[in-house]
Image (tube, rainbow, N blue to C red):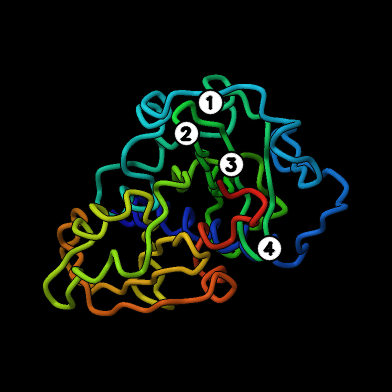
Amino acid sequence: MKTKYYRIFIFLTAIILIFTACHNEGFDETNIPEEFVQGFTIDNSKPFASVLTKTYNLHDLRSFFGQISPNESLMYGTHDVKSLLNINHVNERFPIECLRKAEPMSCYVVYKVNEGGYFYVFWSLCVEPLPEKRSEYSIKNADNASVYFTAYLSPSSLRKASDFDSITENLSTAEDVSQIDSALEISFLMSSGIRSYSLLENGSVMEIGYRNSDKIESRKDLIVTSKNLLSKNIASTASHLASIHPKDLP
């Protein structure tokens, strides 16, 4: 049991390390391409039109990556760290053409979708084998990356703040929120509690807080406790969706 929770801790710690690394580097339109892991190169300088040569059906992408991302399924106990998709496995099925780094916290791959819009894959750094001590885990030792969170965004999928008016504190659940925004990102951080983030059509972000409990096995167990409308800049310190660079949005 301790090993299971330690692996989950390492997985979540890797996300924080990526956030910190990307924040320290910053976003530079004229940046020099740099290696991420496994020989894959981050390049922020090229527009989608010049790098995305393939398009994919949304059904195929969701079937491969799953309907619920590891950032949630690991916490629900429906996913095991050992079964995470690493960057090479992803590249074999869906060749990586565009790998971005965005200020202040995210590294993500983008795929063009036949139905319109884009499919985003965010990453967690990996170290194999896992170090015996937490203090030995360092971003400098990362030799791979695994899928952390995915989201499909299109012009028609982005919501308005008023679309969330039906969400009621102490009654609605994250499942109800997902019926409004299927791309919602749920974050389980001890420092800020359980939050979900939905990117809105005007560029702002809907942040929804949830009650923590000893039994969380699905979105239905997450009871809404608060709703806040945040600027994209403020939300980007905690949300991957909010950190997507404006030029990379549909």
Disc 1/disc 2 C-alpha distance (Å): 6 Å
Nearest to viewer (mark 4 / mark 1): 4
Residue 80 quadrant: top left
Residue appearing at x 59%, y 27% in the figure: 88
Between disc 4 and disc 3, the foreground one is: 4
Count residues near mark 2 (Cα–Cα under 10 Å), then give few for <14, some for 14-19, many for 20+: some
**In terms of depth relative to the viewer, which is nearer, 81 or 160?**
160
Q: Do the residues labelled 1 and 2 touch (CB within 8 Å)?
A: yes
Residue at 88% in and 52% down: 30
Q: Nearer the viewer, residue 156 or 23?
A: 156
Q: Which residue lies under the disc numbered 1?
A: 89
Q: Position of residue 181 (x, y in %)?
A: 32, 54
Q: Distance between the residues labelled 2 and 4?
A: 24 Å
Q: How crowded is mark 4: few (under 14 residues within 10 Å), some or many (20 or more)?
A: many
- The percent position of residue 146, horizontal first and vertical second, equals 52, 40
Q: What residue type is labelled 1?
A: His
Question: Tag on residue 145?
Answer: 3
Identified by mark 3, the residue type is Ala
The earlier-in-sequence mark between 1 and 3 is 1
Q: Position of residue 245 (x, y in %)?
A: 65, 56
In-image side of 230 versus 196 (left or right): right
Taking depth in this image into account, of 211 and 157 the one nearest to the observer is: 157
Question: Which of marks 1 and 4 precedes in the sequence?
Answer: 1
Q: Position of residue 220 (x, y in %)?
A: 15, 58
In the rendered structure, find residue 85 and report the number of the disc placed on it.
Answer: 2
